[in-house]
Structure formats: structure tokens, C-alpha cells
Image: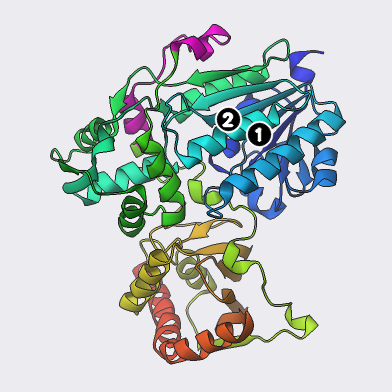
């Protein structure tokens, strides 16, 4: 079979690595099929019209088997570390289903991106990554496992954690294990090796490490980041008492990375994540002719993408299976579910285009049009209980697409120019939405409709709604009034 006739399946295509890998494979002329749970989330990708789409959940054998039908090479890029404290059990179950389905479908090669796990002191995260590889390899399909350390690239969770810690904390108290060695790799080099793996002539089994050209400590990496960013050298005080749990709580408060994701990432720093020379990927895939990207160049490139609002994918793009606090949600309203809402309407002569601009730029640096302290406090409370909080921000400050994260919301629906619906991803005893709609009235005016909707889960959800209802009288009228005022000012300045 010609290399360019091979059908490639990419799981996790709406995630950080997967979204970029699809583009890289298409650039090589390879036919690509993506396996996603929600097709709407991938529509904003520039490659959306160039791929086949299979819909399903990796825990569903039948759907996974159908997605793998006719596939030569399957990329396994799934993980669940931001979903549950039992992510290792979830990952093991998914890997078992995928391995069995791939075998039944006659897949020739599985390529899995795992984590370097050569140190005897493995964190739960790295142990789960290694175990996933073992389970995938337990079937008859050859599994090529590429293991990476810290990935440096605009939008990656590791990079965002490094960036915000270094920018916000000129003086840091850190655990001693920030002096442990690590071998980070630029996202462009990860994509290089993954794409080359898809082009290998014959199926291959084995574990191979991929890493950049330099071995440094996490402390040295932070100091290099400060230097590249034009910041003064950071004062780092090492203490023996900060556990990964305490460290992750602190990271959850000062960076966009939520505690649930920070904990396994921080836990992995207890291990020395360095390429084993005996497992180097260069024995099967030569390094790029121009050489691997240095840490400084990787940081510079990532920062230029971030400052230019040209981040292709972000860690927050991915959503896993239903979060633990959302497993027993209420039925939809047509089934008789309880539903509460706060509805605000205002008629204005401001142009629809300016109103839409104000709506579409909500959140992130723009904020929520007033009551900033209350929004900040709600984000802080969400952080304290392990949620995403407000610091997740936005992918693009001006434009939104379905699936984009907006602080602790996610874009569920968008009709450009007229309607935006956001779904709450904060920790709640129920489901919540915030929507905006513009209606033309035909007399040169238009109505802006703002609606907050809540479907409670049980008595606790109902009590929650009534407890915060007084705050709604402060937040929501102010939001709508200031949103229209911002649109009016923008119209006058044009």
C-alpha cells in the first residue's frame, strides 16, 4: 500500500496535540479521519472540511470499531487527567476498548503518544501513561509508543503553567524537586516525529523516547523563560515541605491551569524525565535536518504565537467524558425538568454590528461588563474546589467559535451577528447557560436579550439558585447595561 493511500485515524483531534497533528498529516497528503465526540467543536479548525469525521466515545466498542473500519494507522492521543481523580482507571478502560476494536477492525499500526517514564520514582500520571501503552500493546496490533517529556508550545498546559508562574511570581517558594532534570521538547518537533511515524514503511512495535537537545531542571527553564520574556531573574526558594497536592493548589490559584490538571503535571516533576539513550527515537526516525529546537527558540516561538493571538490549539480545547459533578444532571425541559432563569431585555438604537462586537468579545481581558469583584470571587471559589476558574481566558480576543473556552464557560452555540450561547464549566450542582440574542424591531432599533438559565440537580441545586439569586440583581442588569454602553462608545469612536 502506498504511504499516501493509507487512511489515518486521529483520536483527540479536538485536543492540543491532535488538532495540530491533523494539519501536519494533511500537509503530507495523507487521508485523515478524526474520531470525536462532538463534531461542532472541530468546525473552527481550518482543516475541518478536509477530513472524514467519525462520531463516538472511546469507551463505546461499537462506535470505536466503526471509526477504525478501513484505517491503516491509528493515533491514540486520549487522556483523562483533567476529568477525575480516578483518571488512571478511565484511561485503562479506554485503552482496552481501543486495542480490542483496532484488532477487530484489522488496523495495521497504532501510534501512541505517552510520557517518558524511565525513572523508578514514577508519578501516578506517568504510571498511567505507561500502563496505557501496555494495554494498547496487549492486542495483536503493533503499537509504536513515542514518549515525550514537557511539551513547549503556545497553548500547552505545561507552557501556560510555566509562563504564568514566571510572569506573576518574582519570588517563588518551590519544592526541592524543581531541581530534577527534564528534557523538554518543542511541539513542532513532537509533530515532526508523529508525522514521520505515520510514514514508516512497515508496522513497528516498541517504546521510543522523544526529547529536545537540552537537559535542564525546571528551575533553569523558569529562569530561561524570564530571560526570554525580558524579566529579572526569579528568586526561587526551595523547601522540603511542599507536596505536589499543595503545589497544585497554589498553581490553580495563580495560573490558568486548574488544580485537577496541575496536580498530575506537578506530580510528574518528582521524576527525572530524560530520554534513555537506548530508547532514542532517532534509531528509527532521523532527527530533523535543521536539528531539534532549542528550549530558548521554543519559548520565543511560543511567546510570539501567544502575543500575536495566533494560538492554533490550547489545552482547554479538549473536553473529556462528563465531569464527576455533572454525571446526574436533570432531564431537559421538555421532559419536565425544573428550570430557573434570569431574563433581561433592552431596546437600543446602537447598530447590530457594534452590539455583536461587544457580545463576541466578552470574557478574557474584556471581562464581564461590570461587577468584576463578584466575577473574580466566583472564579476564585471555583478554583478552590478544583474548577477551571476565570483565568482560562480565551483563544482569540475578538472572535469565538463553537467549542472555544471563555473563562469558565464554553461556546455551545453561535450564530454570528445575532446569537451566542455559553455553557458553564464551573463546578455547579446542575447545568447553567448564559445567552445573548439580538432581534431587529424594524423601526431602526433592536432588542438585546440576555438570559441566564439553570437546571438544578436535586435539592442542593435548587438551594444554590435561591442562595445566589440576590447577586443576580447586581450582576445581570449591570452586564446588559454596560455591554450596550460599550457598543455605543465603540460606534461613536468609529
In the image, taking residue 429 as reference, residue 368 lies left or right, namely: left
Q: Residue at x 21, y 34 (%)?
A: 223
Pick whichever, 93 or 327, lies toward us: 93
Q: Secondary structure at mark 1?
A: strand
Q: Where is 36 relative to 115, above or below?
A: below
User: Label 2's element?
Assistant: strand
Q: Is residue 493 left or right of residue 26?
A: left
Judge whether 4 appears above or below 125 on screen.
above
**Which residue is the site of mark 2?**
113
Q: Nearer the viewer, residue 75 or 174?
A: 174
The answer to whether residue 291 is magenta is yes
Locate residue 417, reporting x and y percent. 58, 67
Q: Earlier in the sequence, mark 2 or mark 1?
A: 1
Residue 368 in sight: yes
Q: Is residue 436 above or below residue 389?
A: below
Look at 57% across and 82% down and name the residue there: 461
Picture quarter with the N terminus? top right
Q: Within 10 Å of the Cα at label 2, are there few (<14), some (14-19), or many (20+) other Cα atoms?
A: many
Region in magenta: 277-302
Q: Position of residue 166 (x, y in %)?
A: 24, 44
Note whether residue 258 is visible. Answer: no
| Residue 380 belongs to magenta span | no
- Identify which residue is drawn at 41% across, 52% down: 257
Q: Position of residue 344 (x, y in %)?
A: 53, 88
Q: Relative to 234, is 2 above or below? A: above
Label disc, if present, on residue 420 of the rendered structure: none
Report which residue position mark 1 lands on: 76
Contact check, label 2 and label 1, Cβ < 8 Å: yes
Quadrant in the rendering for residue 374: bottom left
Where the C terminus falls, by quadrant? bottom left
Cα–Cα gap, marks 2 and 1: 7 Å
Amino acid at each position: 500500500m502506498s504511504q499516501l493511500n493509507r487512511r489515518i485515524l486521529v483520536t483527540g483531534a479536538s485536543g492540543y496535540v491532535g488538532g495540530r497533528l491533523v494539519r501536519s498529516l494533511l500537509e503530507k497528503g495523507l487521508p485523515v479521519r478524526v474520531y470525536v465526540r462532538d463534531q461542532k467543536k472541530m468546525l473552527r479548525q481550518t482543516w475541518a472540511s478536509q477530513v472524514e469525521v467519525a462520531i463516538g466515545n472511546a469507551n463505546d466498542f461499537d462506535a470505536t470499531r466503526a471509526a477504525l473500519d478501513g484505517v491503516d494507522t491509528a493515533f491514540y492521543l486520549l487522556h483523562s487527567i483533567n476529568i477525575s481523580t480516578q483518571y488512571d482507571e478511565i484511561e485503562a478502560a479506554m485503552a482496552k476498548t481501543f486495542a480490542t476494536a483496532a484488532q477487530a477492525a484489522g488496523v495495521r499500526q497504532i501510534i501512541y503518544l505517552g510520557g517518558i517514564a524511565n525513572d523508578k520514582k514514577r508519578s501516578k500520571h506517568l504510571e498511567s501513561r505507561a500502563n496505557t501503552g501496555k494495554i494498547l500493546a496487549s492486542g495483536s496490533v503493533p503499537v509504536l509508543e513515542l514518549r515525550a517529556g514537557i511539551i513547549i508550545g503556545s497553548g500547552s498546559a505545561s507552557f501556560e503553567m510555566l509562563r504564568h508562574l514566571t510572569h506573576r511570581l518574582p519570588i517563588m517558594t518551590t519544592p526541592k524537586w524543581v531541581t530534577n532534570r527534564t528534557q523538554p521538547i518543542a511541539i513542532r518537533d513532537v509533530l515532526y516525529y508523529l508525522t514521520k511515524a505515520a510514514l514508516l514503511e512497515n508496522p513497528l512495535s516498541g517504546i521510543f523516547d522523544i526529547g529536545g537537545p537540552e537537559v535542564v531542571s525546571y528551575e533553569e527553564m523558569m529562569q530561561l523563560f524570564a530571560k526570554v520574556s525580558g524579566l529579572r531573574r526569579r528568586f526561587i526558594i526551595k523547601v522540603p515541605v511542599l507536596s505536589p497536592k499543595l503545589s497544585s493548589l497554589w498553581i490553580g490559584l495563580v495560573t490558568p491551569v486548574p488544580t485537577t490538571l496541575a496536580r498530575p503535571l506537578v506530580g510528574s516533576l518528582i521524576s527525572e524525565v530524560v530520554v534513555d539513550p537506548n530508547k532514542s527515537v532517532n534509531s528509527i526516525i532521523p532527527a530533523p535536518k535543521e536539528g531539534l529546537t532549542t528550549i530558548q527558540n521554543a519559548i520565543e516561538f511560543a511567546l510570539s504565537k501567544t502575543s500575536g493571538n495566533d494560538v492554533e490549539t490550547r489545552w482547554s480545547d479538549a473536553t473529556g467524558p462528563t465531569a464527576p459533578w455533572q454525571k446526574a444532571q436533570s432531564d431537559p425541559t421538555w421532559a419536565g425538568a425544573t428550570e430557573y432563569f434570569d431574563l433581561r431585555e433592552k431596546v437600543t438604537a446602537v447598530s447590530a454590528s457594534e452590539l455583536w462586537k461587544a457580545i463576541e468579545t466578552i470574557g478574557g481581558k474584556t471581562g464581564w461588563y461590570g461587577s468584576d469583584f463578584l466575577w473574580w470571587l466566583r472564579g476564585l471559589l471555583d478554583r478552590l474546589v478544583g474548577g477551571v476558574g476565570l483565568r482560562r481566558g480565551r483563544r482569540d480576543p475578538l472572535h469565538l467559535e463553537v467549542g472555544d473556552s471563555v473563562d469558565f464557560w464554553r461556546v455551545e452555540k453561535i450564530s454570528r451577528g445575532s446569537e451566542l450561547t455559553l455553557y458553564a464549566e464551573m463546578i455547579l450542582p446542575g447545568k447553567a447557560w448564559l445567552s445573548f440574542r439580538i432581534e431587529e424591531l424594524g423601526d431602526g432599533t433592536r432588542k438585546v436579550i440576555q438570559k441566564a438559565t439553570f437546571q438544578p440537580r436535586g435539592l442542593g441545586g435548587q438551594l444554590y439558585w435561591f442562595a445566589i439569586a440576590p447577586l443576580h440583581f447586581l450582576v445581570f442588569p449591570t452586564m446588559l447595561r454596560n455591554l450596550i454602553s460599550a457598543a455605543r462608545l465603540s460606534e461613536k469612536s468609529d
